[in-house]
Image (cartoon, helix red, strand yellow):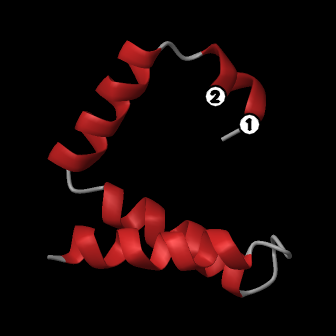
Amino acid sequence: MSTNVKAKLTDEEKELLIEALLSQGYAYEVVDSELKDLEYELKPGYESKVRRLNGLLKKLHN
C-alpha cells in the first residue's frame, strides 16, 4: 500500500479494512505475503518488522 493512500484513510476506514480482512480470511495471506517480501530482501532493513510480523502471523494462524 502506498504511503499516500495509507495517510488518507480515517481511523474508521482503517478499522473497517481490518475487519474486512479478518472476516474474509485474507489477513493471514496479506501478512504472510508481506513477510515473504521482507525475508527475500525485496524490502531490506526491516528486521524489527519481520519479528513483529512473525508474531502477528502466529496469532492469525490460531
Element class at badge 2:
helix
x, y percent for residue 14: 42, 26
The reply to whether the C-beta atoms of the residues labelled 2 and 1 are less than 8 Å apart is yes
- Residue linked to disc 1: 2
Q: Position of residue 37 (x, y in %)?
A: 68, 75
Q: Secondary structure at mark 1?
A: loop
Corner quadrant of residue 4: top right
Question: In the orientation shown, which residue stands out farthest toward the bottom?
Answer: 40
Residue drawn at x 40%, y 76% is 55
Q: Which residue is mark 2?
A: 6
Q: Where is residue 51 shown, x and y percent of the image?
A: 55, 79
Judge left or right: residue 33 versus residue 40: left
Structural crowding at the residue carrying mark 1, measured as other residues with C-alpha within 10 Å and reported as few (<14), some (14–19) or many (≥20)? few
**Label 2 is placed on what type of residue?**
Lys
Please rate how many residues cluster around mark 2, counting C-alpha atoms within 10 Å: few if below 14, some from 14 to 19, many from 20: few
**Residue at image point 33% right, 38% down:** 18
Amino acid type indicated by mark 1 = Ser
Q: Is residue 44 left or right of residue 51?
A: right
Residue 35 lies, with reference to residue 18, above or below; the image says below
